[in-house]
Image: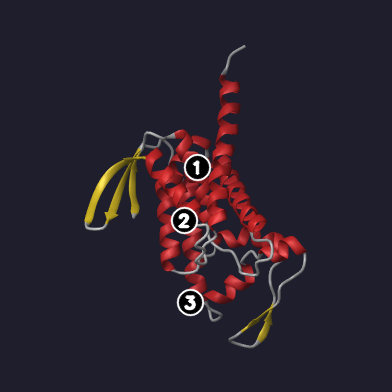
Amino acid sequence: MFIPLKDENPTYRFPFITILFIALNVIIFFYQIFSPQGLQYYVYKMGAIPYEITHLKPVHFVFFETRESLSRLSPPLTLITSMFLHGNLFHLIGNMLFLWIFGNNIEDFLGSFRFIIFYFLSGLGASLTHIIFNPNSEVPMIGASGAIAGVLGAYLILYPGARILTLVFLFFFIRILPIPAAFFLVIWFLAQVLNVGIGGGVAWFAHIGGFLIGIVLIGVYSRRKRRKSVPF
């Protein structure tokens, strides 16, 4: 097991948007937890359901607390709202740790406005990848993992040599080691691919799709940036 703790990659701009996204995710999670309806209510109300997107038909749920039919948000809107929902505290902490370590450098490279666009495009692309491979699923898809996977893909392209201070668990071997970003991120991506057949309630295809979309998006932006910097 590899747990990133921090990266040795300085930034030159304050990461306002990265911190904003983290704050929104944390605030929304604890609102869900302490609301009278509870966390599961919002998962089923605001999570993205592949069946609704592919069949253009609503899925109806009965909220077990009140036995009332739950009124869901419109399917296109859930592709956005689902990116700010998490199923439990460990889900939230893991995603926010990765966003903090890797997101500030991508925001630093893109600038705040472009980073917002990049983040949402990665998240939407990740959700659509999951939907393509699970078109009949009626299980709500939630989490910032897809968008964050896009951030990881971009980091791999931009900073492959950056060192990631990583807590490594290998049986009885427990160490904190500086690992090259390229090695860490390739291992992370291969783990998502290998876990596809396992399932376990995780949208592995969303992680894969988000990562690849992040690579493509940052590649397109980098090429445009280089063309603009070439004098004529």
Residue 18 place in picture, x, y as percent: 47, 49
Mark 2 / mark 1, whichever is N-terminal:
2
Going 56% across and 63% down the picture, which residue do you hit?
142
Outermost top residue: 232
Circle 2 sits on which residue? 22
Q: Amino acid at mark 3?
A: Phe
Residue 99 visible at all: no
Q: Name the residue located 50 percent from the left edge and 54 percent from the top edge.
A: 21
Q: In the displayed structure, does residue 57 sit left or right of residue 105?
A: right
In the displayed structure, would residue 149 be above or below residue 155?
below
In the rendered view, tell whether residue 13 sits above or below residue 24. above
- Image quarter for residue 177? top left
The crowd level at tag 1 (other Cα within 10 Å; few <14, some 14-19, many 20+) is: many
Residue occupied by mark 1: 153
- In the visual, does 75 lie left or right of 26? right
Packing grade of label 3 (10 A; few <14, some 14-19, many >=20) is few
Rounded to the nearest angstrom, the CA distance separating label 2 from label 1 is 19 Å
- From the top left corner, tell me how far across and down residue 128 is, in percent: 65, 54
- Which amino acid lies under the numbered mark 2 shown in the image of this protein? Ile
- Pick the quarter of the image with the C terminus: top right
Residue 92 horizontal side relative to residue 165, left or right:
right
* SS at circle 2: helix
Relative vertical location of residue 9 with respect to residue 69 in this rendering, above or below: above
Q: CA distance from mark 2 to mark 3?
A: 19 Å
Residue to which mark 3 is pinned: 34
Q: Which mark is residue 231?
A: none
Return the disc, 3 or 1, that comes first in the chain's sequence: 3
Q: Quadrant of residue 58?
A: bottom right
Residue 41 rendering spot, x and y as whole percentages: 58, 76
Considering depth in this image, is 189 or 181 the residue closer to the camera? 189
Tell me the kind of residue under disc 1: Gly
